[in-house]
């Protein structure tokens, strides 16, 4: 006897609970394959060649009807059956016109569902009387979708044109400034004609060495926290080697560049031998004299310029004036190039911010409405569970009564049957159907465990909706900003999270001024960031989270950074992580609201947040928060 293999049914549905229900109803009669989105479903269909495909119409990114066109090419012999909650006028007809064999609606009829699937496998096909208008409606729907995409692209082109115009205006401003500097030295004119920061710095060090006949010249840029000098341009082979090694120097007294940044004045060493602040660089063994000059724009140190010679006493005090003037021109050029870059970043940030704000507003209103509707569901499910158990207990009490004893619950069964019939149930027909049903099917249909499991699914789904509602609207509650010590707040938060001591490293100066923000919101901000970092480090042999605080170059702001040594975030999703409900923790309980809440919290408190990440190296979230002004501090200290 040859055993026929079970038919394969592919169900494409983004809701896990719906997939679980269909799996339970079809198991035993079919091999059930599942996909959570249209693209995964297309791949699975190509790999498994199913006998029938059940398809939800409301799928993310690619709708069910759009996916159907591709599926008919991949598995042309497999009937497509829509399984959807869409009962709007014309939906069924447009779906059948798109090539579907059938149209089943939710909620599923659990008694007949498996038989309906069997009928479609045997060749059943729903028909519509007048195909032509519905086919036109389906084609119109496809055209409208394409038109919407074209409108989106046109809007992007308009925005890009506007940004291009703004950038051109900024370039014109820089060119005008450049024309005002033409009376300066020939070296200054040569370097300020470049707008790209990397090209500008590279040209500057080469022109300086050429014009002044120097052994070496290098330009360092100061880090955001003001603690490190990063080599941004270096002359000759030595400079290229240092750049390849990502050469940096700390801002301290162990190098002349560090000294010049700390004191905001030039340093000169006519003979570097015996000069305690000279850094002995192995790539520059011929240096005999050196001068370091600060790059300052409006009293803000941007970095440092170092010039070095193979000759002793190559520089005089008079050279300081000439070279400092050159350094000032370089600082202006650096500032202008950074200003252009920041303008471009600001334009992009504004576009992203407005997009995220619109998404968050629409999402918040929707989830608030859904949450209100879901609020009674958990209580109702619990009451129904208890009522069901009470009913089972009553039946057991009646059945356990010895023959001849009085009825322990007089009139209970009669009342129960009367209530069922009053609700429209034909108890005689249902009883006969149960009697004729195979024992296994009857046991599955009357399974108390299955009923309780369904109630648990209902309760859990409602609780998930309520949790998402709380996560989403929580940051938008009324704020209560005060002046407080962010470092102390973070230390208390870390203790409360009970993370391993070796895993979290904190670093900040003891004299940091207080910030002015809502402490509850800031706790949530850093809790989300630290929690995300810790989850990203799961399985890492040496997990490390570093939290740093420092004064920002803007005296009104404090800089904070939460960095981990995890796997990093791929560049293609670094913008998406801020969008509500986007998550990379599929199947691990993530709601995709943590980082969108962080962005909203920082925005409400007048700050800024951004991410820097490299795959395989780790991720750093940078935050700028406003410092408390004296009136805020007095307000807290003297309520």
Image (cartoon, rainbow, N blue to C red):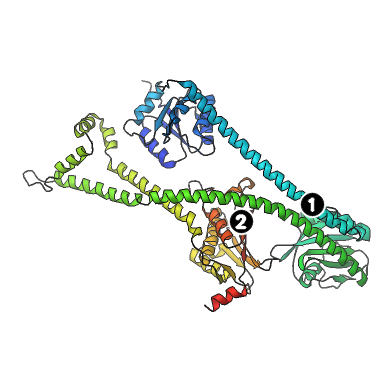
Give me the residue at 18% from left, 42% from top.
416
**In terms of image quadrants, where is residue 513?**
bottom right
Direction from residue 409 to residue 151 in the image, left or right: right
To which residue does mark 1 refer?
171
User: Where residue 358 sits in the image (x, y, percent)?
Assistant: 56, 49
* Residue 589 shows up from this direction: no
Direction from residue 337 to residue 569 in the image, left or right: left
Q: Considering the image in quadrants, where does the N terminus appear?
A: top left
**In terms of image quadrants, where is residue 112?**
top left
Sequence order check: which comes first, mark 2 or mark 1? 1
**40 over 552 or under it: above or below:** above
Q: Nearer the viewer, residue 69 or 286?
A: 69
User: Where residue 15 sits in the image (x, y, percent)?
Assistant: 44, 41
Do tag 2 and tag 1 residues touch (Cβ < 8 Å)? no
User: Where residue 83 sits in the image (x, y, percent)?
Assistant: 42, 33
User: Where residue 172 sits in the image (x, y, percent)?
Assistant: 81, 52
Could you say whether the residue bearing mark 2 is in a helix, strand or loop? loop
Mark 2 crowd level (few <14, some 14–19, many ≥20, 10 Å Cα): many
Q: Nearer the viewer, residue 404 or 2?
A: 404
* Residue 497 shows up from this direction: yes
Direction from residue 276 to residue 376 in the image, left or right: left
Could you say whether the residue bearing mark 1 is in a helix, strand or loop? helix
**In terms of image quadrants, where is residue 26?**
top left
Q: Nearer the viewer, mark 2 or mark 1?
A: 1
Give me the residue at 47% from left, 28% from top.
95
To which residue does mark 2 refer?
565
């Amino acid at each position: 006897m040859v055993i026929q293999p079970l038919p394969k049914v592919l169900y494409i549905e983004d809701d896990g609970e719906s997939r679980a229900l269909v799996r339970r109803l079809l198991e035993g009669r079919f091999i059930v394959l599942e996909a959570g989105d249209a693209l995964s479903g297309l791949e699975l269909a190509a790999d498994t060649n199913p006998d029938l495909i059940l398809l939800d119409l409301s799928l993310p990114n690619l709708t069910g009807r759009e996916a159907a066109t591709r599926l008919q090419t991949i598995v042309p012999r497999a009937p497509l059956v829509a399984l959807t909650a869409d009962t709007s006028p014309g939906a069924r007809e447009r779906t059948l016109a798109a090539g579907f064999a059938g149209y089943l609606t939710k909620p599923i009829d659990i008694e007949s569902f498996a038989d309906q699937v069997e009928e479609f496998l045997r060749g059943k096909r729903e028909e519509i009387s007048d195909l032509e208008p519905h086919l036109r409606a389906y084609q119109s729907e496809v055209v409208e979708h394409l038109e919407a995409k074209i409108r989106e692209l046109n809007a992007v082109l308009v925005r890009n044109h506007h940004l291009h115009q703004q950038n051109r205006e900024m370039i014109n401003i820089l060119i005008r400034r450049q024309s005002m500097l033409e009376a300066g030295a020939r070296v200054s004119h040569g370097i300020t004609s470049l707008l790209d920061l990397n090209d500008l710095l590279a040209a500057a060090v080469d022109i300086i060495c050429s014009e002044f006949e120097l052994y070496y010249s290098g330009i360092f840029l100061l880090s955001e926290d003001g603690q490190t000098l990063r080599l941004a341009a270096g002359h000759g082979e030595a400079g290229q080697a240092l750049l390849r090694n990502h050469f940096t120097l700390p801002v301290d007294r162990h190098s002349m560049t560090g000294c010049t940044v700390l004191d905001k004045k030039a340093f000169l060493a006519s003979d570097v031998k015996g000069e305690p602040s000279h850094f002995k660089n192995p790539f520059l063994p011929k240096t005999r004299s050196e001068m370091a000059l600060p790059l300052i724009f409006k009293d803000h140190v941007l970095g440092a310029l170092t010039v070095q010679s193979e000759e002793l006493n190559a520089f005089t005090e008079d050279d300081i004036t000439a070279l400092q003037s050159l350094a000032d021109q370089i600082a202006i050029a650096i500032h202008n190039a950074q200003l252009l870059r920041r303008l471009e970043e600001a334009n992009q940030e504004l576009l992203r911010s407005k997009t995220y704000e619109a998404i968050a507003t629409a999402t918040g209103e929707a989830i608030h409405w859904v949450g209100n509707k879901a609020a009674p569901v958990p209580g109702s499910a619990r009451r129904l569970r208890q009522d069901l158990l009470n009913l089972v207990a009553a039946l057991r009490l009646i059945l356990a009564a010895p023959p001849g004893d009085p009825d322990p619950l007089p009139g209970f069964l009669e009342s129960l049957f009367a209530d069922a019939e009053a609700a429209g149930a034909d108890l005689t027909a249902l009883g006969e159907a149960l009697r004729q049903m195979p024992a296994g099917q009857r046991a599955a249909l009357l399974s108390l465990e299955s009923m309780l499991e369904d109630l648990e699914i209902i309760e859990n789904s409602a609780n998930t909706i309520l949790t998402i509602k709380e996560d989403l609207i929580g940051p938008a509650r009324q704020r209560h900003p005060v002046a407080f010590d962010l470092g102390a707040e973070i230390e208390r938060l870390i203790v409360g999270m009970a993370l391993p001591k070796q895993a979290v490293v904190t670093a900040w100066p003891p004299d940091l001024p207080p910030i002015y923000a809502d402490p509850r919101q800031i706790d949530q901000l850093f809790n989300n960031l630290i929690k995300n970092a810790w989850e990203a480090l799961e399985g890492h042999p040496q997990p490390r989270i570093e939290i740093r605080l420092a004064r920002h170059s803007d005296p009104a702001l404090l800089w904070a950074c939460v960095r981990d040594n995890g796997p990093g975030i791929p560049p293609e999703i670094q913008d998406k992580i801020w969008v509500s409900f986007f998550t990379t923790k599929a199947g691990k309980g993530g709601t995709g609201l943590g980082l969108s809440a962080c962005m909203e919290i920082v925005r409400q408190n007048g700050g800024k947040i951004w991410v820097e990440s490299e795959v395989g190296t780790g991720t750093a979230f940078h935050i700028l928060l406003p410092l408390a002004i004296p009136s805020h501090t007095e307000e807290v200290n003297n309520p």
